[in-house]
Amino acid sequence: MDFIRFEIMFRSQLFNNSVKKGMFAVLGSQKIIYKKPLKRWSTFSITLSLEGWDEKWVYHKHTFTQKNQVCAIGYTKAAFWKGKKAQNIDQILKNSGVTLNEMNPSANVLKLFETDYELLKETEEAT
């Protein structure tokens, strides 16, 4: 899933308006839902869809297909960081030529990630 996101970044103005300005991409979380197994070394396709963004995070959907069947769907939440601080996604996207003022992720996508911090906190408390 990382490869397709980086490929799009490098082929667009996003690279010039993030990495070349000292920012680096950070994956905040990812979820994968498998419908059918993707066997090792088998050929499959991935389609990346932008699901929206907020001030800090960009949300993507990755659809894995094999033999014209959906085998898995992955969701990611990513940001750009510089100097230990998440950067404003709205400004980065505007500088990169995105003409939409906003694209809010759906409630279902946000719900996938809403308990991430609680899970981390539980793990820290248990150790």
Image (cartoon, helix red, strand yellow):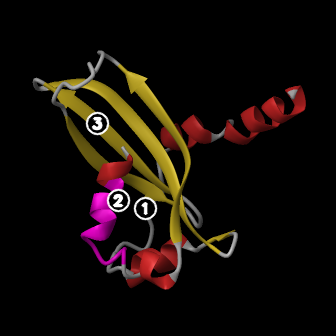
Residue 103: mark in rendering: 1
Please identify the residue farthest to the top as the structure is shown. 36
Q: How many marks?
A: 3
**Above-or-below relation of 8 to 97:** above
Tell me if residue 18 can be seen: no
In the image, which residues are magenta? 5-15
Inter-mark Cα distance, 2 to 1: 21 Å
Find out whether residue 113 is within the magenta segment: no
Q: Residue at x 69, y 36 (%)?
A: 115
Query: Which residue shows up at 50% across the image and 74% down it?
Result: 90
Whichever of callouts 3 and 1 sits on the residue coming sooner in the sequence is 3
Q: Position of residue 53 (x, y in %)?
A: 48, 60
| Residue located at (33% from left, 66% from top) | 9
Q: Is residue 13 magenta?
A: yes
Residue at the front extreme?
Answer: 41
Amino acid at dot 3 = Thr
Mark in the foreground, 3 or 1: 3
- Pick whichever of labels 2 and 1 is earlier in the sequence: 2
Residue 20 lies, in percent from the top left, at 43, 82
Nearer to us: label 2 or label 1: 2
Residue wearing tag 3: 63
Say above or below: 7 vs 18: above
Question: Residue at 55% across / 35% down in the picture?
Answer: 112
